[in-house]
Image (spheres, grey):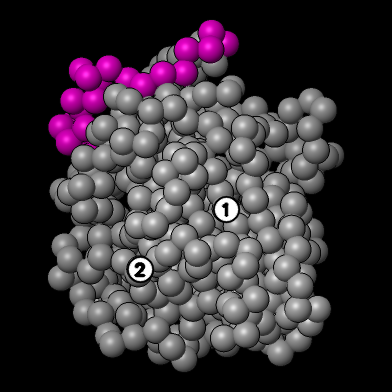
Amino acid sequence: MNTTLKMLGALSLSLLASGVLAAVSEQEAAKLGASLTPLGGEMAGNAADTIPAWTGGLASDAGQVDARGFLSDPFASEQPLFTITAQNLEQYRDQLSAGQLAMFARYPESYRMPVFPTHRSTAVPDAINAAAKTSAVKTGLRDGGNGLTGFTDSRYYAFPIPQNGLEVVWNHITRYRGGNLKRSIVQASPQTSGAYTLVNFEDEVAFPENIPDIDPGKAENALLFFKQRVTAPARLAGNVLLVHDSLDQVTEPRMAWLYNAGQRRVRRAPQVAYDGPGTASDGLRTSDNFDMFNGAPDRYDWKLVGKRELYIPYNNYRLALPSVKYADILKAGHINQDLTRYELHRVWEVEATLKSGERNIYAKRRFYVDEDSWQIALSEHYDGRGQLWRVGEAMLLQHYAQKIPVYALEALYDIIAGRYVAVGMANEEKMSIQYGTQASAKDFTPAALRNAGVR
């Protein structure tokens, strides 16, 4: 580890030990848009010229958007620079995560990583860049890092100049997602043979600043409102999940409800948090595995390891093309790596260790967070014996037309069982996502679940 990373780690430990968890100075925040990108990444490229400087991200007209909302691939003409395989991975070991190395060991014949030229494509609207700068000087951590103070003026990218691991994770949690949205997505949990059943979801997400009739008292500590309806298969169709997420989930824990279409009843769902089972995932992911990590961070101690240059999934437009079918993507053991794209990027490495006396099926976790978008790109989850159990990969891409960093899909691999769950695949039959949708507070109440289930 170089001197910079050692100093960064020492600073993080000092801040956590002293309880000084505060916003940065105006002088530090002035680096945003200068030596740092508006969201806090390093503006400059690397010394080897294998990572370019950030020059504003992809333009809004970088490609075409069809009538269903599908994006064309602005890099379709590019060919891989090289492909990492189990046979040549020693040459690239320093730029691979422990999870990626484990995937090569588990699937030496089929797992591969096509590596393409690096494009720093992340861009968000100017108003979101301004919000991040406001966050830098006003937002702090409260309740041992489990909540935020001074965040209501900005609402995005809580800590663009992070001082510790928990602040990096909060950036992922509070990143810009395009405002209110509706999307139609698909999930699958293939058997070891490759056979799978598709689960179709219709998701709605709304944010307090975009809900005109929300109670101001409720809005103050609200992070987002999430509603998910299962539309297939028939045995699950009509079931609806509702989640109210707060900024401080210790003071005001997550509230969740489930509408069971068979029973026609709405019930509280406290299991939809932490390591509770993920919806229709065949036990292959937890609730907090969704979106790579979500929910309260209070059960872990968070350590900022530092920054690394890694080959991570990036600009994965091919996986989101309507011409690419589920059968093309879903294969035995892992998704079809011939459809993937990896690039060399700088990431923040954060390690989470379960606190003494707390419970979670994951005793240790490691996250690799893209410096430009603050999206978690890779994750590793260890069991109570310290054995690597599950490996997560999020296939990042930039929705250039809307200026939103998103995922083409997320895959969570159980390297012990030889199975995985893929969630977030675009629906082949209908418009996959709509941004800037209207929302009313009454649509995100338990009373609204029954009607949502029978639409």
Question: Residue 263: horizontal and vertical position, in percent?
Answer: 81, 78
Q: Please tell me which residue lies in front, 438 or 427.
A: 438
Query: Percent position (x, y) of residue 48?
Result: 27, 40
- Position of 412 relative to 219 (above/below): below
Specify whether residue 9 is painted magenta: no
Quadrant of res 60 = bottom left
The secondary structure that dominates the magenta segment is loop
Label 1's element? strand
Measuring 41% from the left and 19% from the top, which residue is drawn there? Answer: 22
The part of the chain drawn in magenta is 17-38
On screen, 159 above or below 102? Answer: above
* Quarter of the figure that contains the C terminus: bottom right
The amino acid marked with disc number 2 is Gln
Q: Residue at x 21, y 79 (%)?
A: 64
Mark sitting on residue 438 = 2
Which residue is at 76% across, 78% downward?
264
* Relative horizontal placement of residue 74, taking residue 106 as reference (left or right): left
Q: Residue 229 at x, y = what percent?
A: 60, 75
Q: Nearer the viewer, residue 274 or 322?
A: 274
- Using the image, determine if residue 157 lies above or below residue 74: above
List the residue tagged with mark 1.
Answer: 244
Question: Dot 1: few (<14), some (14–19), or many (≥20) neighbours within 10 Å?
Answer: some
Q: Please indicate whether residue 55 sits to the left or right of residue 136 in the image.
A: left
Instruction: Using the rendered view, name the quadrant where residue 267 is placed.
Output: bottom right
Relative placement, left or right, of 43 versus 201 is left
Per the model, the C-alpha gap separating discs 2 and 1 is 17 Å
Q: Residue at x 44, y 27 (%)?
A: 149
Q: Amino acid at mark 1?
A: His
Give left or right: position of 267 versus 443.
right
Q: Can you tell which quarter of the image residue 81 is in?
A: bottom left
x, y percent for residue 340: 45, 70
Between 18 and 375, the one lying in front of the other is 18
